[in-house]
Amino acid sequence: MLENGLARHADAPAVQRAPALVYLAELRVRTGDHDGAVAVLAEVEAMDLTPAEREALATDYAAAAELAADLRRP
């Protein structure tokens, strides 16, 4: 459902999409789709956000960084 919602609202502002994408990455990790999680996290990292938007999403970006670190561990 989350992927469908993101696809339907692909034109939503990045600041609104980022939290949903981070959650999707977490779901993919939990279901064993590590490659999918890496792809979603790369999409989050590539988002063109202002410093104020990144600050507003600090919790989401911290969660994304933690997920990325977990994925790099053997």
Image (spheres, rainbow, N blue to C red):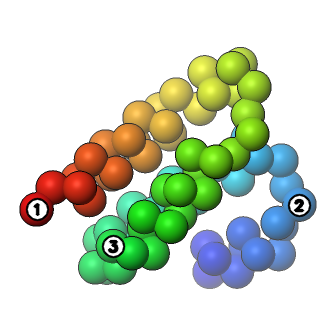
Q: Which residue is mark 1?
A: 74
Dot 3 and dot 2 residues touching (CB under 8 Å): no
Image depth: mark 3 or mark 1 in front: 1
Q: Residue 71, percent across and down?
A: 26, 59
Dot 1 and dot 2 residues touching (CB under 8 Å): no
- What residue type is disc 3 on? His
- Quote the CA–CA distance across marks 3 and 2: 26 Å
On the image, which quarter does residue 72 sit in? Answer: bottom left
Residue 11 sits above or below residue 51 on the image:
below
Circle 3 crowding by C-alpha within 10 Å: few under 14, some 14–19, many from 20: some
- What residue type is disc 2 on? Asp
Circle 2 crowding by C-alpha within 10 Å: few under 14, some 14–19, many from 20: few
Secondary structure beneath disc 2? loop
Q: Residue 10, percent across and down?
A: 82, 66
**Towards the viewer: 22 or 69:** 69
Residue depicted at x 82% and y 75%: 8
Q: Earlier in the sequence, mark 3 or mark 2?
A: 2
Residue depicted at x 49% and y 56%: 41
Secondary structure beneath disc 3? helix
Q: Which residue is mark 2?
A: 11
Q: Which residue is mark 3?
A: 34
Q: Earlier in the sequence, mark 1 or mark 2?
A: 2
Residue 12 seen anywhere in this rendered image of the structure: yes
